[in-house]
Image (cartoon, helix red, strand yellow):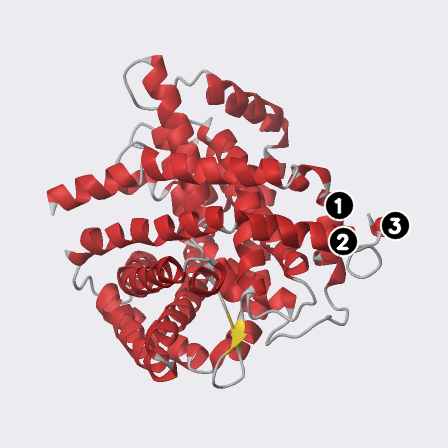
Amino acid sequence: MEIITAISDFLWGYPIIIALLVVSVYLTFRLKFFQFRRPLYIFQQTIGQVGKKTRGKGTVTPFQTLTIALSSTIGAANIVGVPVAIMLGGPGALFWMWVIAFIGMALKFGETALGVHYREKNAIGEYVGGPMYYMQKGIKWPMIGKILAVWYAFFLMIELIPSIMVQSNSVASTITDSFSIPPVFTGIFIAIFAGIVVFGGVRRIGRVTSYLVPVMALLYIIAGLIIIFIHVDMVPEIFVLIFTEAFNPTAALGGGAGVVLAESIRWGFARGIYSNEAGLGTSPIAHAAAQTDHPIRQAFWAVIQIVVDTLIICTITGFVVLITGVWQHGDAHEDSVREALTARAFEETFGTIGSSVVAVALVLFVFSTITVVIFYGARQAEFLFGLWAGTAIKVVYIISIVLGAVGGATFLWSLLDLTLFFVVLPNLIAVLLLSPKIIQLYNEFFHTEGKYYKKDTE
């Protein structure tokens, strides 16, 4: 297990970060830095269209697909992961988190466009898509495409078991610490409600997340902004600290200055990627179900996903931790403490109510994450073995919620977390091979004036 953990830590260090960075930068150049040139247009075509009649075919609305995708990415990484990055990489890690967010927009945009373009209808009339479909249908060499598709689907289906268990365990631990409720009861409670949602299909998941995600995100954002406004005089100082530490870090752990700077970049990139899941290929599974008239129009929603998840929620968490000074407490570097720094920061301002707010937010975030990753896993089983397998794997995932809550099969977590690397790898290969199709779709959207794109709307 020590060897497996060491290999997993190494792969999820610089190798995967470099690979994701290279693909993201490549697509940013090929797409002519669209995320920097067209931000207002992207908002007009997404948030600006909420409530209006949608165009094109699909199973759920574009806004519902956004909330489904956000349910997967907004979770423990936003509340627990950000302070961990600050403690291991210094305050400058927040800057590098922003950098990877902006660059990663191109990667997420590209994989989402592919997911919608190569989608198809399943046996019950729902639109399905994602990496396994664009690998199989888009890559010209049939055997290569099929192998990558099966590889991706199998490893993601398996990896989601420990992922669900870890999420369930974090909720059960938080509930036990805050309200003294035994973990098994928490696990059963979450399993029942998750089952009700996921067995209702993508439409029910879309309806639930379209209400739950905006409410829980808004409450957390408002609470965080209150803390920031209370200390508004410190905001310029915090900005200076973040930018200074990004290039000349002193607070991060490490030996020489070079090592410290490398750690700051590493943890900023790692937490940013872990938070918004750019390159993982999961979001296209959700976006493939959207009602849309063109893949690029739906891909704009994937950009908004990173804005909400990383640039807004992760930034608020980071500012709250830095502005309240909890990251400088003597015990802040201890593993158990740094994971609770966000709760401690809220408690500094709101008292015990503050820590309860974080506990409730974490529960809601994780519950929504669990329901959506079960949906993702079911899509993989369906792709591999048929519609019946999607239903069967949902039962396995529901059982995993209870087992994870009570700490069952903890020894498997390190072993199975290793499979996540083998999920990202084939997706990055596929996105690179299919990058000409991404560019073609992009040009088709913007150069077919009057049909998809109108200059006077930008």
**Element marked by disc 1:** helix
Please report whichever mark, 1 or 3, sits nearer to the chain's N-terminal start: 1
Please report whichever mark, 2 or 3, sits nearer to the chain's N-terminal start: 2
Q: Amino acid at mark 2?
A: Gln
Q: Which mark is residue 456?
A: 3
Left or right: where does residue 245 sit relative to residue 148? right
- Using the numbered discs, state the Cα–Cα distance from disc 2 to disc 1 in whole angstroms: 6 Å
Residue density around tag 1, few if under 14, some if 14–19, many if 20 or more, within 10 Å: few
Q: Amino acid at mark 1?
A: Leu
Q: Tell me if label 2 and label 1 are in contact, CB under 8 Å.
A: yes
Camera-near label (1 vs 3) is 3
Q: Residue pushed farthest right?
A: 456
Q: Is residue 247 above or below residue 172?
A: above
- Using the numbered discs, state the Cα–Cα distance from disc 1 to disc 3 in whole angstroms: 12 Å
* Residue 418, x across and y down, in percent: 24, 50
Using the rendered image of the protein, determine whether residue 351 is visible from the camera's viewpoint: no
Q: Amino acid at mark 3?
A: Asp
Q: Nearer the viewer, residue 70 or 334?
A: 70
Q: Which mark is residue 44?
A: 2
Using the rendered image of the protein, determine whether residue 131 is visible from the camera's viewpoint: yes
**Element marked by disc 3:** helix
